[in-house]
Each structure stands twice: as structure tokens, then as C-alpha cells.
């Protein structure tokens, strides 16, 4: 599969739907943690996902999550953090 604008749009659309669903399921916990702990909570969540990705890459994972799922979670956390830090960067 090639990387092109249409595939990027499809992926970002899918990710937006996933983020909205997870945000509803988890009751906006990411934003609440961010407001309480700042970027530290983002670093912890990203570190957890990066460790999972390393284990998936070494075929040592004990969970039913694919590499693609893990990469989507990493991208999602980065997007959420970017949104929550928009005002700080201006």
C-alpha cells in the first residue's frame, strides 16, 4: 500500500472516530488527567504504548492488540496532547 493523500485522510478519519468513541467510553479521562498532571500523563501513556510496540515487534506480547492498533493509540495520544497544549504554545 502506498502513502498518498487519500490513504492519509482515511487513516485520520478512522482515528478521529476511534478517539471520539474511546473518549466517550473512558469519560474524557485523558483530558482530566492532563489537567491534573500535565505532560507527565502523556509521557507515561506514550511510554506504555511504545513498550507494547517493542514487545509486539519481538513477538512477546501477551495481549490481543495488533501493531496497527498500538500505532493508532500512539497517534491518538499525540493528537489529544497537541489539542490540549494548543493554548500553551501561543
Image (cartoon, rainbow, N blue to C red):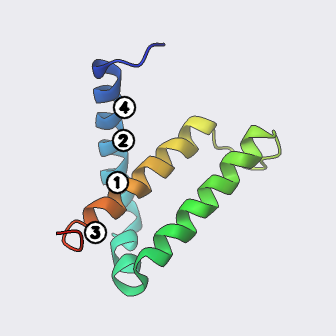
Question: Mark 4 near mark 3, Cβ–Cβ under 8 Å?
Answer: no
Question: Looking at the image, is mark 1 or mark 4 nearer the viewer?
Answer: 1
Outermost residue on the front side: it is 90
> Is 54 situated left or right of 67 in this image?
right
Question: Mark 2 near mark 1, Cβ–Cβ under 8 Å?
Answer: yes
Which residue in the structure is indicated by mark 4? 11
Question: Looking at the image, is mark 2 or mark 1 nearer the viewer?
Answer: 1
- Few, some or many residues within 10 Å of mark 3 (<14, 14–19, 20+): some
Question: Mark 4 near mark 2, Cβ–Cβ under 8 Å?
Answer: yes
Q: Determine the CA span between mark 1 and mark 4.
A: 13 Å
- Few, some or many residues within 10 Å of mark 4 (<14, 14–19, 20+): few
Question: Of label 3 and label 2, which has the lower sequence position?
Answer: 2
Residue 69 at x, y = what percent?
54, 41
Image vertical order of residue 19 relative to residue 85, above or below: above
Which residue in the structure is indicated by mark 2? 15
Question: Residue 64 occupies which quadrant of the picture?
Answer: top right
Question: Of label 4 and label 3, which has the lower sequence position?
Answer: 4
> Is 61 situated left or right of 83 in this image?
right
Which residue in the structure is indicated by mark 1? 79
Question: Of label 1 and label 4, which has the lower sequence position?
Answer: 4
Amino acid at each position: 500500500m502506498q502513502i498518498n493523500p487519500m490513504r492519509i485522510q482515511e487513516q485520520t478519519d478512522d482515528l478521529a472516530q476511534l478517539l471520539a468513541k474511546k473518549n466517550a467510553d473512558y469519560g474524557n479521562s485523558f483530558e482530566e488527567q492532563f489537567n491534573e498532571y500535565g505532560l507527565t500523563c502523556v509521557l507515561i501513556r506514550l511510554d506504555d504504548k511504545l513498550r507494547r510496540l517493542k514487545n509486539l515487534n519481538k513477538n512477546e506480547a501477551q495481549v490481543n492488540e495488533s501493531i496497527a492498533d498500538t500505532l493508532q493509540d500512539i497517534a491518538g495520544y499525540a493528537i489529544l496532547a497537541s489539542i490540549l497544549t494548543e493554548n500553551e504554545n501561543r
